[in-house]
Amino acid sequence: MNNQNNSKDNLLKSAITLFSQKGFENTGISELVQMAGVTKPTLYYFFQSKEGIYKEILKQYYGRFNTILIEKSVYIPNTKEYKKDVYPILLKIVKSYFEFAENNKEFYMMILSLSFAPPTAQSTIMTKPYNIEQYEIITKLFKDISKVHGNLKDKESQNACHFVAMINANIAFWYQNHGEIDDSKAEMIVHHFMHGMFV
């Protein structure tokens, strides 16, 4: 049983590495099983196909991250104090993205690379439901905020899109060794975003 678990884990780890470096479409099953140190029948036994292993990666990582975002996206209004109203919840979200990207670097880079993939690519299609779920979580947060800050009404989807885009741009720069993703960077993102949001 331990050997089976090791084989499955090795396949998942190898797949994430290859998909993040070469993309899903450019990764072959032969090189995947070779890196994992298993046979093709082993891959088929656990995942049925290359698509099956990709879907399992999405399920595990996105499932975990989206659950974190739901837990962190609880807005408690405090309009009398700037630092205790919208600011802390947005800061909490940015830090959650940063922490997840740092702890799951290859997976996150695999996902970021899809920003430049064709919409008809198989990897894009398989990832789309998880992206939609994530944006719905962030959009719901902005809807909760707009109930208190009426000037943000009807801008919730737009704000969610811009907010996540700012976060991901900074993570991408960090990945390319251009800057850090630390508390000061998180604070800067929130300040810049809120300045534009409330204009």
Image: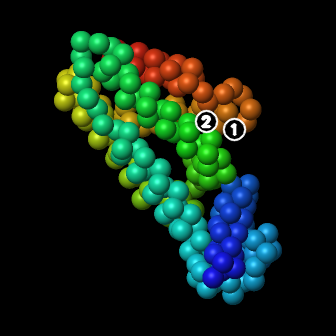
User: As displayed, is residue 132 above or below residue 3?
Assistant: above
Q: Is residue 176 left or right of residue 65?
A: right
Q: Residue at x 29, y 41 (%)?
A: 140
- For this rendering, which residue is in front, 71 or 169? 71
How has the structure been colored for display? rainbow
The percent coordinates of residue 115 (x first, y second) are: 57, 47
Quadrant assignment, res 198: top left
Question: Helix, strand or loop at disc 2?
Answer: helix
Numbered mark located on residue 12 in the image:
none
The amino acid marked with disc number 1 is Tyr
The percent coordinates of residue 131 (x first, y second) are: 45, 52
Q: Rounded to the nearest whole Å, what is the CA distance between mark 1 and mark 2?
A: 6 Å
Q: Is residue 164 left or right of residue 117?
A: left
Q: Quick check: can you spot residue 18?
A: yes
User: As displayed, is residue 101 above or below residue 129?
Assistant: above
**What residue sits right under mark 2 in the picture?**
171
**What residue sits right under mark 1 in the picture?**
175
Q: Residue at x 46, y 22 (%)?
A: 190
Question: Helix, strand or loop at disc 1?
Answer: helix
For the residues labelled 1 and 2, say whether their Cβ atoms are less than 8 Å apart. Answer: yes
Number of residues whose C-alpha sits closer than 10 Å to that of mark 2, classed few (under 14), some (14–19) or many (20 or more):
many
Looking at the figure, which quarter contains the C terminus? top left
Q: Residue at x 56, y 39 (%)?
A: 99
User: As displayed, is residue 166 above or below residue 114?
Assistant: above
Farthest residue to the front: give it. 2
Q: Is residue 153 left or right of residue 41?
A: left
Number of residues whose C-alpha sits closer than 10 Å to that of mark 1, classed few (under 14), some (14–19) or many (20 or more):
some
- For this rendering, which residue is in front, 198 or 105? 105
User: As displayed, is residue 22 above or below residue 102?
Assistant: below
Looking at the figure, which quarter contains the N terminus? bottom right
Q: Residue at x 56, y 24 (%)?
A: 183
